Image: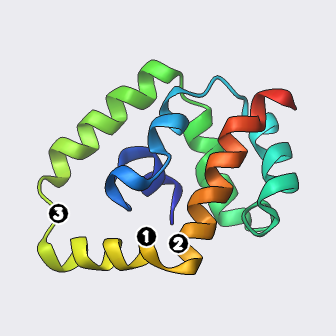
Amino acid sequence: MAAAGLLFGTGAAGAQPHHRLLDTTCTFEQFRAAAQQHAPDLAADPERMAKFEKVLDMSVEERHAKAAEMRERMGEIPPEKRERIRAWKESPEGQAEITAMRTVLDTCAQF
């Protein structure tokens, strides 16, 4: 899932750790170090990491404002997209990515 989806809730709705990303006080450097240890596939993806860097360069307040703006702009998620999201959340790949992201966000302050 893209950083924007994780951050702004456009991905797997409530199951994503986007609130942790909104509220983290970790720097991008801390996030990257945690990702290298707990989510090496994510850490090795320069495009995705660049998106996280952009997000983490914002203050917590800016992230919350951007999330509210995107939710308002996106409106209701169509049923077919909601079903794809549900299927992804329940897939082994989705579960692994959700768990890895939670671990990264829960541990980044230690780096």
The front one of 85 and 53 is 85
Q: Bin the neighbour count of mark 3 within 10 Å (Cα to Cα): few under 14, some 14-19, many 20 and up.
A: some
Taking the spot 75% from the left edge, 41% from the top edge, the residue there is: 31
Q: Bin the neighbour count of mark 2 within 10 Å (Cα to Cα): few under 14, some 14-19, many 20 and up.
A: some
Residue type at tag 2: Gly
Taking the spot 54% from the left edge, 28% from the top edge, the residue there is: 58
Give the mark, 3 or 1, whose residue is nearer the N terminus. Answer: 3
Determine if residue 84 is in view. yes
**Residue 99 against residue 29 in the figure, above or below:** below
| Residue under pointer 3 | 77
- In which quadrant of the rendered view does residue 88 lie? bottom left
Taking the spot 44% from the left edge, 30% from the top edge, the residue there is: 63
The front one of 89 and 108 is 89
| Residue under pointer 2 | 94
Q: Considering the image in quadrants, where does the C terminus appear?
A: top right
Determine if residue 10 is in view. no
5 left or right of 29 in image: left
Per the model, the C-alpha gap separating discs 3 and 1 is: 15 Å
* Secondary element type, mark 2: helix
Taking the spot 61% from the left edge, 32% from the top edge, the residue there is: 57
Q: Which mark is residue 89?
A: 1
* Secondary element type, mark 1: helix
- In which quadrant of the rendered view does residue 90 lie? bottom left
The front one of 101 and 61 is 101
Give the mark, 2 or 1, whose residue is nearer the N terminus. Answer: 1
* Secondary element type, mark 3: loop
Residue type at tag 3: Ile
Residue type at tag 1: Lys
96 left or right of 19 in image: right
Residue 27 spot, x, y in % from top left:
73, 29
The front one of 86 and 108 is 86
